Amino acid sequence: MQTLLVDLVYLAVLTLLAVPLGHYMHRVYEGELPRGARVLRPVEHWLCRAGGPGTLKPQGWQAYALAMLAFNAAGFVLLYAILRLQAVLPMNPGQIAPLSPALAFNTAISFVTNTNWQAYSGEAQLSPFSQMMGLTVQNFLSAGTGMAVAVAVVRGLTGPKSQTIGNFWVDLIRSVLYILLPMSVVFAVFLAWQGIPQTFGPAVTATTLEGARQAIPVGPVAGQIAIKMLGTNGGGYYGVNAAHPFENPTIMADMVQTLSILLIPAAFCVTFGKMARDMRQGRAIFIAMLVMFVAGLAVIQWQEAAGNPLLHLAGANMEGKEQRFGPALSGLWAAATTVASNGSVNAMHDSFMPLSGLVMLVNMEVGEVIFGGVGAGLYGILLYVVLAVFLAGLMVGRTPEYLGRKIERREVTLAVIAFLAMALGILVAGAVVATLPAGQAAVSNPGPHGLSQILYAYSSFTGNNGSAFAGFNAADPLQAILGGVIMMLGRFAMILPLLALAGSMARKVPASATAGSFPTHGPLFVTLLVGTVILLGALTFFPALALGPVAEQVGLVAGQSY
């Protein structure tokens, strides 16, 4: 009952906060700033003028995509240089050595793609300068990129006929300046109040129970955690992420951080409804996401509360969890962080029950569209919307339409290309790794659980999630390089076809709905959309899942552990 109450309060607060935030975001992207935000208007104007007048012109999808790619490429080069040169850069009181080339490549790609996969231990291998000027800056910029792309895709689907879908630089600046930055400042102050360090001082020295002295690194932690959560980045200041008491000191901090993971993704549904000039469209997408999230959360909470049957004891599964959080708050965080491309953890996912791991894998493998990352979740679910409407058109024998625009062969082809990127990154790359000696050596468990570790890692890479079954060694040079490549595939092989799709839809003249139009806002459409996500995910990934978490669960019932 207590777990149910926590979940209900969480969902209620999420819904209540998403509505005003979604309305505010709509005003930001339309350039109609509320009075309190207008104080930042001169900063926006200065940043927009810095690139010259030509950078502010409306862009077609090709120009928008090129600007986005160039910006992210520059961010990668800069972050890679910081990680490789941190030994000679300032703010390195611990004289921390630079990351290896492979690990620096993996980390730079990880943060640029909003994955924030951590194959390193932050407090031991990164200086405060690298954490703050490298990782935290990219937390803002990668999140802003996803938000900008989402707005561009929505414009293509909902705006008047046009050859353009907006301007990347304007959308990026507005995302960071008016949404991410103010929210992060307020959130960082709250986290510092809860006890998270925000300092440039030296490490704290503690005396252990055995009498030994231990140095505990501190730094500008609260600022990084704020944007890590709000931007669905997930990369923590410490190696164990939000399981570290300096990142997650209180129950209140835990609950608010869990809420912040899904806040902006949920608000984007409201923003979509406003931009479509039909709130029913945004509400339908929100309900579809909520239904899938609640279903997965219920399985995780049930499995973790039931515990391990091999122990023959009544009680929850507490392996890998903090006593103060228990299965309820750990399960809620695990569900939220894997439906969004967040990847932060307050418990070790490798220790969850097999069916809990199955839910987390499915959350990532369907493309991080159940709320998903900031922006990325919305443009990801719109991919499934296009496919769902196409299937509905086939069933009723009519040309499929969405928001008055016909969905034709080109749009369906682009949607399928984007979807296939997930299968390529997870199944093909995962299969290659599973057959290589270096890949087999990276797993720490035999049998189905070892396969689950590989599936989880490559699902996390491709879905730009960043969480892990911690038993998988991703610091190996092979995994670091291949993982970085797969992160790029998962990010940009999804974005580019969807921008092309938005450009194609924008060039069409929207028509008014008729009696023969398929409604895309009612219970029937919500059911069809959820069914499309489940059907495509099941057909694509179930055979691999059957050999991993499903086989592990069957073995567990039969008395076999791995």
Image: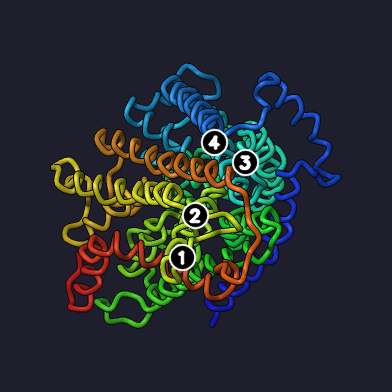
- Judged from the image, the secondary structure of the residue bearing numbered disc 4 is helix
Q: What residue did someone put label 2 on?
A: 407
Q: Are marks 1 and 2 in contact (CB under 8 Å)?
A: yes
The three-letter code of the residue at mark 4 reads Trp
Q: Nearer the viewer, residue 122 or 465?
A: 465
Amino acid carrying label 2: it is: Ile
Residue in the image at 27% along x and 39% along y: 479
Q: How packed is label 1: few (under 14 Cα within 10 Å), some, or many (20 or more)?
A: some
Q: Secondary structure at mark 3?
A: helix
Q: Earlier in the sequence, mark 1 or mark 4?
A: 4
Q: Is residue 72 above or below residue 13?
A: above
Mark with earlier residue (3, 4): 4
Q: Nearer the viewer, residue 366 or 333?
A: 366
Which secondary structure lies at badge 2?
loop
Disc nearer the start of the sequence (3/1): 3
The location of residue 464, given as percent across then percent down, is 43, 46
The 10 Å Cα crowd at callout 4, few under 14, some 14 to 19, many 20 or more, is many
Q: Amino acid at mark 1?
A: Gly
Q: Earlier in the sequence, mark 1 or mark 2?
A: 1
Q: What residue would you read off at disc 3?
A: 223
Are the residues tagged 3 and 4 within 8 Å (C-beta)? no
Q: How is the image coloured?
A: rainbow
Residue on which the image places disc 4: 61
Numbered disc in front, either 1 or 4: 1
Tell me where residue 482 sits by quadrant. top left
- Label 1 and label 2: CA atoms lie apart by 9 Å
